Image (tube, grey):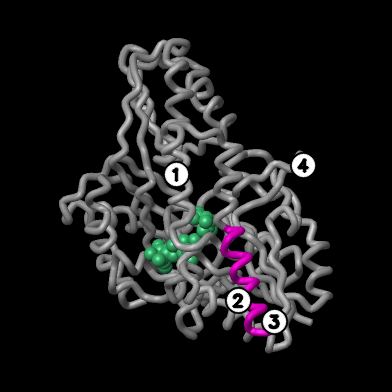
Amino acid sequence: MTVVVQKYGGSSVADADRIKNAARRVGKAKDAGNQVVVVVSAMGDTTDDLIALAQQVTERPRDRELDVLLSTGELVSSTLLSMALENLGYKAVSLTGAQAGIQTDSAYSRARILRVDASRIISELERDNIVIVAGFQGVTHDMDITTLGRGGSDTTAVALAASLGAEVCQIYSDVEGVYTADPRLVPEAMNLKEIGYEEMLELASYGAKVLHPRAVELGQLYGVTIVVASSFSNRAGTTICKEASMEVRNKVRGIAHDTNVAKITVVGVPDHPGIAAAIFEPLAKENVSVDTIVQNASINNITDLTFTVARTDLPRAMSLMEPLLKSIEAKQCITDSTLAKVSIVGTGMQNTPGYAARMFRTLHEAGINIQLITTSEIRITCIISEDKVKDAVGALHKAFELEKA
Ligand code: ADP
Ligand code: ASP
Ligand code: MG
């Protein structure tokens, strides 16, 4: 029997009617003769609401406690979906991440899956149950509950698809697949029929939140085909797989934007060996990902060092930086939380000159100042003011003719 893994995001289980809608879709996959495993996110904005609630109690909730709290959102939706399925006459069982065998490291709020012990899921499937797994969560070796990072239910789904040998992992959201840009920002954005893992990984890592980047990474690693589609329509959606068609390779495939950006500038640092290590090692140790790093040319052996982190990581990053300033003899740290990233992505840009120049000119013509630039082989990212994001994405979408994709 074929194993099908489906994942329903927060908007697809936002209320009782939507949960019943998801149940009918799950039922269809079961009726088609499949063994069905379903991963769910928390209902609607539950995760945001739980974070806000914790912050009403304390400014800095302890990571361990916060993860237990946040994991409860997915328990609510998984149990309700299981009940809705029973009500339609199907046998269903809900499992927490721990019961489903999702074993993680202990990096609370950003835990990584170390291993999946799928034995409980397999035995439930053998009993002809539809298995509903609470997404976004796992358990450490010491039985502490962890969460996988915002949007992490996608990663739960792909990890389960990989360990169960499912050929396809279907991700159901409120959009009909992956578009050339966020369709909420750019109404002309086009739905992509397919996209390769590599391009999708860059888009997801640079803000296209339709898929969690680590889900794409796992899909690529284990050869799981991921299909992104809407739970509100029957359109085919977007297939993320190894090889996208050759003809679409030689241009920009999509534009991502990310407003979860903060910039930290360490001002007046003595420019001698070991300074970069002294700054970035403590951040790495605390799992704070640093993105763009720019070091100014030094004058009289004094330099400024600028880097970006996720805005949500800024308090954590600053709590590490402040005590460090004295030991590295830096003058001060300046932060800016009003920035955003816009990125153009496409494997066709490799070894083809002109894309960066076109991007910079487009932003210039739209009156947008570029603060920092970073690139990979298949991506160019500009850091700009957050209030210019919509203009920037719209202008770039037009300049690279993505409405003709
Ligand atoms: P879910 O709750 O189902 O996981 P998310 O809100 O995490 O859904 O992701 C879906 C959202 O991703 C869409 O509503 C859309 O606004 C946003 N998005 C950003 N970039 C893209 C893109 N390139 N294609 C499609 N959706 C995108
Ligand atoms: N509920 C979690 C979040 O809002 C996980 C997810 O939706 O994938 O980030
Ligand atoms: Mg999501």
Mark drawn on residue 90: 3
The answer to whether 188 appears left or right of 122 in the picture is left
Three-letter residue code for mark 4? His
- How far from the left and from the top, in percent, is residue 277? 53, 23
The Cα–Cα distance between marks 4 and 3, rounded to whole angstroms, is 34 Å
- How far from the left and from the top, in percent, is residue 349? 42, 61
Q: Which residue is mark 2?
A: 84
The Cα–Cα distance between marks 1 and 3, rounded to whole angstroms, is 36 Å
User: Between residues 62 and 346, which one lies in front from this camera angle?
Assistant: 62
- How far from the left and from the top, in percent, is residue 189? 33, 72
Query: Earlier along the polypeptide chain: callout 2 or callout 4?
Result: 2
Mark 1 and mark 3 in contact? Answer it, CB < 8 Å: no
At x 47% / y 56%, what residue is drawn?
46
- How far from the left and from the top, in percent, is residue 201? 52, 58
Is any part of residue 148 visible from this angle?
A: yes
Three-letter residue code for mark 2? Ala
Mark drawn on residue 304: none
The segment highlighted magenta reads 74-90
The Cα–Cα distance between marks 2 and 3, rounded to whole angstroms, is 9 Å
User: Between residues 361 and 92, which one lies in front from this camera angle?
Assistant: 92
User: Between residues 229 and 72, which one lies in front from this camera angle?
Assistant: 72
Q: Secondary structure at mark 1?
A: helix
The answer to whether 26 appears left or right of 354 in the picture is right
Q: Secondary structure at mark 2?
A: helix
Query: Earlier along the polypeptide chain: callout 4 or callout 1?
Result: 1
Viewport quadrant of the N terminus? bottom right
Q: Which residue is mark 1?
A: 53
Point out the residue furthest to the bottom here: 32
Three-letter residue code for mark 3? Tyr
Q: Relative to 35, does residue 7 appear above or below in the rendering?
A: above
Q: Which residue is mark 4?
A: 141
Query: For the residue carrying disc 1, how many other residues have a C-alpha within 10 Å: few (<14), some (14-19), or many (20+)?
Result: few
